Amino acid sequence: MDVSEPQIKRIVLNRLERCSVCHHLYEPDDIRVITRKPAMWTLLVECTECPARNFVAAVLQDGDPEEAQRTLRELSRSSAFGDEFPSVPEPVSPPVSTDDLLDLHEYLADFDGDFRKLFGA
């Protein structure tokens, strides 16, 4: 199967579509090819609105899904990229406390499910 970079990016965009952190809609330029082999491509999808990033393995017809999983685990653990992939900064806000969770629980007990009313127009 002969595939092009735009085809692979389109497939990845169809699967990931939005950033799981800030819900920014991904663009083809947010995807960079890391490696390209006949049976598997590895890619980096970086959000331009927040520091989120995802490693993706595109397994082609003859590719081995287990090899793709191993490759993604190695990429996630590897520091071989140096400064090319900056680390995600520590959160600025304090961690969620037990009191925060109890407050949320109490609020949701009476919540009617109307998110439009909750967030306003």
Image (cartoon, grey):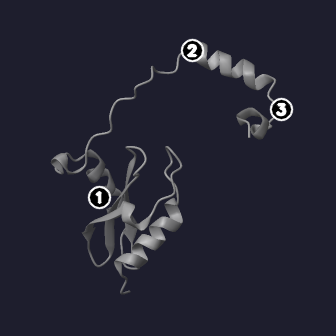
Instruction: Locate the N terminus and report the quarter of the image it occupies.
Output: bottom left
The kind of residue on which mark 2 rests is Thr
Depth order, front residue of 111/75: 111
Camera-nearest label, 3 or 2: 3
- For disc 2, the neighbor class at 10 Å (few under 14, some 14 to 19, many from 20) is few
Mark 1 or 2, nearer chain start:
1
Residue at 36 percent of width and 87 percent of height: 2
Percent x, y of residue 9: 41, 71
87 to 96, vertically: above or below? below
The kind of residue on which mark 3 rests is Asp
105 to 90, vertically: above or below? above
How far is the residue under mark 3 from the one under mark 1? 45 Å
Residue at 16 percent of width and 47 percent of height: 82
Percent x, y of residue 86: 25, 44
The image quarter in which residue 51 lies: top left
Contact between marks 1 and 2 (CB within 8 A): the answer is no
The disc placed on residue 98 is 2
